Structure formats: C-alpha cells, structure tokens
Amino acid sequence: MYQSRAVPKGARWGSSCFEDKLVELAVKRVLEPIYEEAFQDSSHGYRPGRSQHKCLEKLGGTIQQKRVNHIVEADIRGFFDNVNHEWMLKFLKHRIGEPRIIRLISRMLKGGITEDGLVRASEKGTPQGSILSPLLSNIYLHYVLDLWFSLKIKKQCRGKAYYFRFADDSLACFQHKADAEDFMNRLGDRLKAFGLELSPEKTRCIEFGRYARDNARRGGQKPREFTFLGFTHYCGKTKKGYFKMKRRTSHKKFGQCIREFTDWARRSRSVLKKGQMLRQAKIRVAGHLNYYAITDNSARCTSYLYYVTRILFKWLNRKSQRKTYTWEGYRQALQWVGWPKPYVRKDLNPFRSLQAI
C-alpha cells in the first residue's frame, strides 16, 4: 500500500504517495474530533487552536502565579522511532470500535521506511512525514504520560503539581522537592513499560521559582535554568524587584538558526537574483522572529538580526567578482525590501494578559 520516496543515503524517513496521503488525511479527520474530547489540557502539540506560544504562555503563568518551586525536565530518547505498535493499537481500540479502521492504521504503521536507499518494513515507530503521525503520537503519550500524571502522580503529591507536554517534549512543575524526585524516579519505569526509554543525561530535577534565585546565591551558586521549546527559561525580576520568569533563545537553537541561514545564503547566491535573494531572506528572518520575538527576548532577536544581516551582505557580494553592494547601498536595499525589526511579536507576560481581560 505505502510507497517510500527516495531520500539521500544515510537518511531515515517514512513517507507515503499522494493517494495514501489522502487516506491518511481522511483517517485523521475521523479520529481527531474523537480524541480532542479525550485529550488532557496539558497536551499542546499538533492540536487545533493550540501552539508553542500558548503552551509557553500557560507555563509562564503557572510558574509565576502558582506554588512552583521545582521543575523536572524529561527527554524521551528517539520517541518517534520507538513507538510500540502493539501498544498503539491497544490504545486505539480503547475508543475506536471499528476493526477496519484499526487494520488500516496497522498497515500505515508497518508501511516501511527508506534507510540508506533500501526499503524495509517497520516493526516499531511512526513514520515521520506522515500526516497521521502527529495525532498517533499524541494518542500514545496521552495514555502513557498525560493520564498517568493526572490520575496517579498528581493525586499522590503532597503539594501542587502541574504538567505540560508539546509532542514528545514534557515538563513537570512541583511545589515540593520530594514530589519532584519521586516523579523523576518513577518516570523511567513508566516509559520502559511501553517500549520507551528516558535519556538520563537530559532528565533532571532543578529548583526553580520565586525563591530559587536567592537560595542559589546564598549557597554561592548560579540560579538553575531549563530549556523548553527552543527557549532557555531563567529566574529574573521585574523593575520593582518581584520575581519574573524570563526567556531567551537557547544557545543551541540560536547557533543552529545562524548556521541554517548561512548555508541557505551560500547556496542561494548562485541561483537567485539579488532582489529574489533579499526577499527570500526577509521571509526567513520574519519567520524566525514570528516565533522567537517574545517578551524578554529582544536582546537575542537583535543579535540574530545583527548576524544574518552581515551574513547576507557577505554572500550577496560574492555573487560575482565585482562587489555588489556598499554598506550604504545595502542599507537602502534592506529598507526597500522592508527588512524586519526586532519588536515583540508575542507578549507572554501573564500579568498583562490578566489586565487585558
């Protein structure tokens, strides 16, 4: 049924042909309304009306307004490659009574992947690139993590507990350290029971909240930080001295974005005209800012614009042996194309959100 498209040597990818994509879309439209009613509010990834920004906004409001003193970061090693097909079908049967739908999804899961130019049937995992894969991953983690935290962990905690998940990235917030450590100790066994594995090097419990900064400095240490959805979250203060959780683009994502823009500019200089290159660069930069230009991240966005502006200038001037632009001419070209400015696109301050209601 499923055809794997050609991919470069060394790549691992599962993709379907056009006709199969139509079937995947039809199945998705059938399943999505059924599971939207069942999914927990803690799940934010690949769902209608939800986004990374809304997840970050809710996380920020929880940490700043609730009793949160400890954070548990958890990372699932190779989640999409290790989804257990048997468990996946059991979860689907819990709400889907039509055996033909179950058989169809089973064939989709076993559709095969292309690896090093060879096609082989997949015994586990969901094909990345499939229209249905994000919904299936949400269903799997709904039973493995979301319900477990809501019905078991949260009820057994002595204090308050909150949970956030976007796709396979999850974060848990606790009032008491003992509850956080107990959750972290039990998480590995929970994932193992369903064929998944925790990354020990990326899983940790840290003190984070309104008292974390002062406690760390009294102990002669730096306040701890955590990374979630491409942002490094750290403890800061408002102008009046009150606690405020702040965010900046993570060092890893910042470097990755700069390298990607550099690679694009180097490739584009030989195939695009100057005007086309400027317009496409603008689109790429605007896309970056639409995601990363949030409250408290202006400095990193300004740095990003500084570097990509100079990278673009360098590769535009390498289109030919003669120099294409002087700095004055380049600035005029940027003004002509409407080069983006580093203003805040998304205000994630929870207190301003409350005032707007």
Image: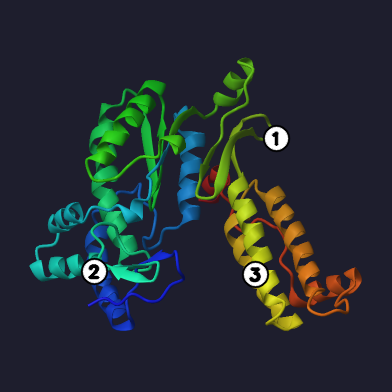
Residue under label 3: 264
Q: Is residue 48 above or below residue 338?
A: above
User: Which amino acid lies under the numbered mark 2 shown in the image of this protein?
Assistant: Met
Q: Nearer the viewer, mark 2 or mark 1?
A: 2
Q: How is the image coloured?
A: rainbow
Q: Is residue 276 above or below residue 334?
A: below
- Residue 30 percent location from the top left of the image: 22, 70
Label total for image:
3
Residue under label 2: 108
Whether residue 250 is visible here, answered yes or no, is: no
Residue 267: name its quadrant.
bottom right
Along the line of sight, which residue is nearer the eye, 76 or 56? 76
- Residue 245 percent location from the top left of the image: 57, 37
Residue 144: name its quadrant.
top left
Q: Secondary structure at mark 3?
A: helix
Residue under label 1: 239
Q: Please give the name of the residue rendered at 19% of the width and 69% of the height, measured from the top-left corner.
A: 107
Q: Quadrant of the image for the N terminus?
A: bottom left
Whether residue 196 is visible here, answered yes or no, is: yes
User: Which amino acid lies under the numbered mark 3 shown in the image of this protein?
Assistant: Trp
Q: Earlier in the sequence, mark 3 or mark 2?
A: 2
- Residue 95 percent location from the top left of the image: 14, 58
Q: Please give the name of the residue rendered at 55% of the width and 51% of the height, measured from the top-left corner.
A: 356
- Residue 5 percent location from the top left of the image: 37, 76
For the residues labelled 3 and 1, say whether their Cβ atoms are less than 8 Å apart.
Answer: no
Residue count near mark 2 (Cα–Cα under 10 Å), binned few <14, some 14–19, many ≥20: many
